Amino acid sequence: MSDLTATPTCSRGLGLPAVKVSAVVMVLYLLFLFLPIYWLISMSLKTNSEILGGFGLWPKNLTFQNYVTILTDPSWYMGYVNSLIYVVENTVISLTVALPAAYAFSRYRFMGDKHLFFWLLTNRMAPPAVFALPFFQLYSSIGLFDTHIAVALAHCLFNVPLAVWILEGFMRGVPKEIDETAYIDGYSFGRFFVKIFMPLIASGIGVAAFFCFMFSWVELLLSRTLTSVNAKAIASTMTRTVSAAGLDWGVLAAAGVLTIVPGALVIWFVRNYIAKGFALGRV
């Protein structure tokens, strides 16, 4: 009896160090992830001379002048405006195209459907550099160069396949009997799709919108190639800040911090949908 009663105590004693080790590993992992972000914020609050002067864990002379420069200089803050415009346009266009396409792939069988679905995914696999020159020549010839819609349409090349792939997985999980019941009740396809079907896959739409936004926001090559002045993105602006005095590291760090903000806000607003999407969908 004494041996039997001692066994649970030993297992609990052995489990306690394992919990502590897991907590330590998690803390170290989080510190490793947040270290670059902390370093970026620290640099953004320093002067250029202090950054180049030596190593320091925190600013000795705290300054917000780098943020003031970005928020008051049109060449800087318009980069954020331009980026937000074409990213939102791309997200709306990608979801508008992907929703009916994903519904067709999930509900119907037709000749070459699997080949067409695979071809869509191959567009996502190709690097943007492959399409930079064709897009540049096409948009230059039809007058779309240096416009927001040009970058938005170019980003659809890899965001639409991604959105179709994500949404098709969610739609396949919705029983077909719901469609048939709605038609029997007199719903038109448009009314059924908006009123009944889309709320059922709201988490999938949130996940697809998140990935479309993020991939379009961080893309550099196409946004830099297809714009020059009127629609120049913030990522392109950050790569063209070399002057006779060298790089202004403080301003670049502040621009990097402000670049993280839109993505963090998007994650905050769709966090519940993302959690469901990772649990239920293809992500």
Image (cartoon, rainbow, N blue to C red):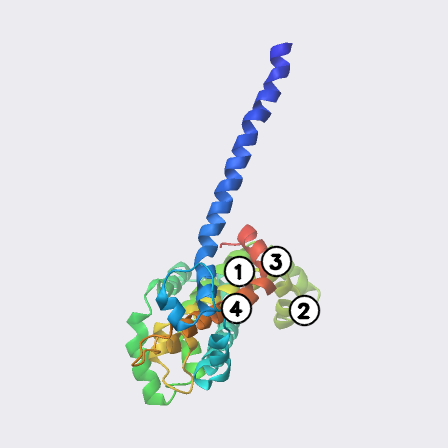
Please determine whether, in this image, residue 27 is positioned above or below residue 48: above
* Secondary element at tag 3: helix
Q: CA distance from mark 3 to mark 4?
A: 19 Å
> Disc 3, disc 1: CB below 8 Å?
no
Q: CA distance from mark 2 to mark 1?
A: 17 Å
Quick check: 195 left or right of 21? right
Which sits in the foreground, 33 or 91?
33
* Secondary element at tag 4: helix
Q: CA distance from mark 3 to mark 1?
A: 27 Å
Tell me the kind of residue under disc 3.
Asn
Of labels 3 and 1, the one closer to you: 3
Which sits in the foreground, 227 or 7?
7
Tell me the kind of residue under disc 1.
Arg
Question: What residue does disc 4 label?
Answer: 261
Tell me the kind of residue under disc 4.
Val
Q: Position of residue 176 (x, y in %)?
A: 59, 57
Question: What residue does disc 1 label?
Answer: 107
- Specify the label residue 187 is tagged with: 2
Question: What residue does disc 3 label?
Answer: 272
Q: Position of residue 161 (x, y in %)?
A: 43, 65
* Secondary element at tag 2: loop
Q: Residue at x 39, y 62 (%)?
A: 121
Q: CA distance from mark 1 to mark 4?
A: 38 Å
Please determine whether, in this image, residue 222 is positioned above or below residue 196: below
Q: CA distance from mark 2 to mark 4?
A: 42 Å
